[in-house]
Structure formats: C-alpha cells, structure tokens
Amino acid sequence: MKKFWLVGASCILVFTVILSCTSKPDPEQQRAQGEAARNLGEAYLRQQNYTAALREFLKAEKMIPDDYFLQNDLGLAYYYKGEPDKAIFHFKKALEFKEDYAPARNNLGNAYMLKQEWDNAIEQYKIVISDLLYATPQFPYSNIGFAYYHKKEYRLSEKYFKESLKIAPDFANALYGLSRTYIASGRVPEAVQKLEYAVSKAPEQAQLLFELAEAYVLMRDYRKAYGAYIQVVQINPDTPLAEQALKKAQRIKPLL
C-alpha cells in the first residue's frame, strides 16, 4: 500500500510539473515584452539600421501581432530594405487593426509609389488628406503631386504641389516637385524661380542645388550653372552626385 501511495505521489508531482511547463505566459507580461522589442526596433529604425530593426519587430510580432503600431513599423522596415510588397502587406495589416491610422495609410501610398503604382498611391494619399486631424497634410499633397508628375498629368501635378505649399510655403520637397513640373511643361524661368527660393531656404540640400544648376543650363546661364555645380561638390563631396556635378561643371566651363 505504501508503495502504491509513493507511485501515486510521483504521478501527481510529474503532472504538476507538466502543467507548470505548459501554462500560458502572463498576457500583460507578454505585451510588455513585445512593446519593449518594438521600442528597441524603432530606435534601430531611427538609426537607419534596418536589419536590426526588422529583427526586433519580428520578435515583437510573436508577442503582440495585433499591435497596429508594430505592423506599421514592420512595413517601414521592409520599405527601407527595398521590399515594397512585404511593406504593403504590413501597412494593410496595420489598417485592418485601425482603419483611421493615417501614418500607415500614407506609408502605404509611399510603398505603392516605390512600385510605380501611381493610381493606387494617389488613392491612399487622398484618403489621408481627407482626414482633418492629420497633422502634416503638406506631405500627402506633395506626394500626390509627384504621382501625377510621373503620370505626366502636369496640370494636376501643379495643383497638388501648390496645395502643399499653401500649407508649408518653404516645403523643399514640394518646391522641387513644382519646379520639375514647370520644366516638364516648358516653363523653365518659373522653375528657376522656385528652385532659387528652395535653395535659399535649404542651402545644405545638394540635390536642390544640382537641380538649380540643371535649370540654369536650360536657360543657358552657364556662369550660374557652373557656380551651382561647384557648390554641390563643396557641400556633398565624395558622393556620386558630386562626381556627376563636377563632370557637368567641367563640360560647361568652356562656355563661360
């Protein structure tokens, strides 16, 4: 009888151990761990360490798969790693969990832009600008402008870039886009005017200076063009853009 009791006690002990091993983790603790991994991933994202960010986000997804912030973060990591299809999947998941989460919708538009799916991008951006609570509508307005620019619908492109500039008159991205639209429409002097203003507001942006130099060349103002190309080299040395600017400067030097 004693032996039977010992066997029974052993079975109870084993059963208790099995239960303790298979018991579910505390949901609050799991969420806290998931959020900690997400926060670490976001820190990596800000540092542009996209591989490390993705690793943390995937770890977090195992614990908080329904977190719309995390799904948006996953989309961003894939977007910056050049995986637009995966990015689109996660931005859409974020919107499934919270349909009115405008940052995810704007990012979804950006992913469509990366795939050159202009109409899909425009559809998402227009939903964003219809949200009166969205804090920075100049971005989706400008993005719509670029989408129409790529569709060669320059009248609409101009319209949306101007809407962006109504909100943020110094927004370099919209000024650049509007100038590109003017150049494509044969309105080079207007493009030069916008680019000169943009450069005055953001003189450290080498790409703007390069575009201004290109516009000066179209105007046959080679002296100003040469000066702008050299500024690009000075501001952003040892880069492909600087190398390209130097070659163009040398090409037009005899015309000064």
Image (spheres, rainbow, N blue to C red):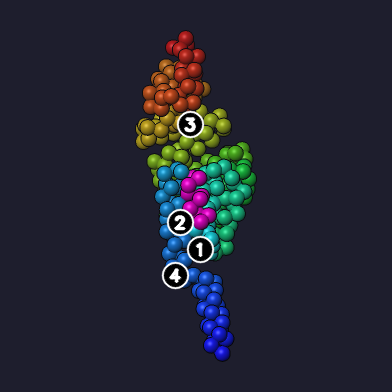
Q: Which mark is residue 191?
A: 3
Marked residue nearer the N-terminal end (3 or 4): 4
Say if 249 sits above or below 126 in the image. above
The amino acid type found where label 2 is placed reads: Arg
| Mark 2 or mark 3, earlier in chain | 2
Residue drawn where x is 38% and y is 23% of the image? 234
Q: Which mark is residue 38?
A: 2
In what element is the residue under mark 3? helix
Span shown in magenta: 50-59
Residue 208 % position (x, y): 44, 31
- Quickly name the residue at label 1: 64
Mark 4–mark 1 contact, CB under 8 Å? no
Q: Secondary structure at mark 2?
A: helix
Q: CA distance from mark 4 to mark 2?
A: 15 Å
For image coordinates 47% across by 66% down, the residue present is 30
Compute the Cα span from label 2 to label 3. 43 Å
Residues at marks 3 and 4, CA–CA distance in whole angstroms: 56 Å
Marks 4 & 2, CB-CB < 8 Å contact = no
Q: Earlier in the sequence, mark 4 or mark 2?
A: 4
Q: Earlier in the sequence, mark 1 or mark 2?
A: 2
Q: Secondary structure at mark 1?
A: loop
Q: Earlier in the sequence, mark 4 or mark 1?
A: 4
